[in-house]
Image (spheres, rainbow, N blue to C red):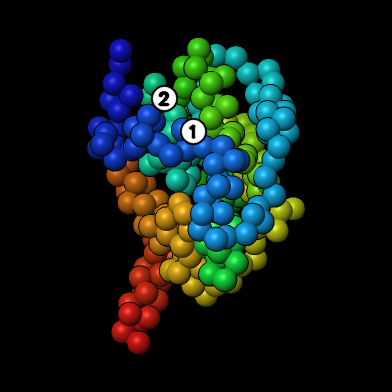
């Protein structure tokens, strides 16, 4: 069997093994129980299983063979997928934007919202792509959709990507601007505050941002906006610590 990390050996040991990922077995009921344990309101508009499965089948309609999944945020370091290959990838016409505001308990709350990334329209986005073998696509996408499409916020779409200089298409999750959690016009100062202070059962928004920057760097990618945001967040946190 070929080494999935043969093209990027530096990622070996930095991407969580799928069998160890919390997201491998995530369910709506599990998230609701976690929120209840933490005394948080069950405010997230979860998709019923049948709706989510319908969205998955719609997205994959007509697809055959191996599947590339384009990752731009937490999927980079914790994809929860049994993949055959990981490669640096470029998504033309898109951009990684930190516009997804979490008020539901994942990485922020209503009192202290958190911030995460979404894939939006833009000049181009550098990320990584995971290749899932054809015989595992059905099982792995069921797991993937339970995570990414647990509720509204994203559109699951195939997008054009470039991998090792070759054109391909990959499944990814794009910002749904009809969802109130997607704040496309969020001010920079608000981004900084949310990324610096948001905390939930998945961890902190700060760790999310720092991990995104660090794992992109591992494959030679510097996202100037993400790096600048991280620098601003660290300055904000240092200021609060010294106050």
The quadrant holding residue 170 is top right
Viewer-closest of 7 and 108: 108
Residue 161 % position (x, y)? 53, 33
Q: Residue at x 60, y 40 (%)?
A: 28
Report crowding for label 1: few under 14, some 14 to 19, many 20 or more residues within 10 A (C-alpha): few
- Residue 149 to residue 228: above or below: above
Residue 187 % position (x, y)? 58, 71
Q: Are marks 2 and 1 in contact (CB under 8 Å)?
A: no
Dot label at residue 106? none
Residue 81 visible from this viewpoint? yes
The quadrant holding residue 173 is top right
The quadrant of the rendering that contains the N terminus is: top left
Badge 1 is on which residue?
A: 25
Q: How many marks?
A: 2
Q: Residue at x 51, y 68 (%)?
A: 194
The quadrant of the rendering that contains the C terminus is: bottom left
Residue 58 % position (x, y)? 71, 26
Name the side, left or right, on which 29 lies relative to 208: right
Report crowding for label 2: few under 14, some 14 to 19, many 20 or more residues within 10 A (C-alpha): many
Q: Regarding mark 1 in the picture, which secondary structure is present there?
A: loop
- Residue 132 to residue 217: above or below: above
Q: Regarding mark 2 in the picture, which secondary structure is present there?
A: loop
Camera-side mark, 2 or 1? 1
Dot label at residue 83? 2
Residue 223 visible from this viewpoint? no
Name the side, left or right, on which 174 lies relative to 89: right
Q: Residue at x 26, y 36 (%)?
A: 13
Name which of mark 2 and mark 1 comes first in the sequence.
1
């Amino acid at each position: 069997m070929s080494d999935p990390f043969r093209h990027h050996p530096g990622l070996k040991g930095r991407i969580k093994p799928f069998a160890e990922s919390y997201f491998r077995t995530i369910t709506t009921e599990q998230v609701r129980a976690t929120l209840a344990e933490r005394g948080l309101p069950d405010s997230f508009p979860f998709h019923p299983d049948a709706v989510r499965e319908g969205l998955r089948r719609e997205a994959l309609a007509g697809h055959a063979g191996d599947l590339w999944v384009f990752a731009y945020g937490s999927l980079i370091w914790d994809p929860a997928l049994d993949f055959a290959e990981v490669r640096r990838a470029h998504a033309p016409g898109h951009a990684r934007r930190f516009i997804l505001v979490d008020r539901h308990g994942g990485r922020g709350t209503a009192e202290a919202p958190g911030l995460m990334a979404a894939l939006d329209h833009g000049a181009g986005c550098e990320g990584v792509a995971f290749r899932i073998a054809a015989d595992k696509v059905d099982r792995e996408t069921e797991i993937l959709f339970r995570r990414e499409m647990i509720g509204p916020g994203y559109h699951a779409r195939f997008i054009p990507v470039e991998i090792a200089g070759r054109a391909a298409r990959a499944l990814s999750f794009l910002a749904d601007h009809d969802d109130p959690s997607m704040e496309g016009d969020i001010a920079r100062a608000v981004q900084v505050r949310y990324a610096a202070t948001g905390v939930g059962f998945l961890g902190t928004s700060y760790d999310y941002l720092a991990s995104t920057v660090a794992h992109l760097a591992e494959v030679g990618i510097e996202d100037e906006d993400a790096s600048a945001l991280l620098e601003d967040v660290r300055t904000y946190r240092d200021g609060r610590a010294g106050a």
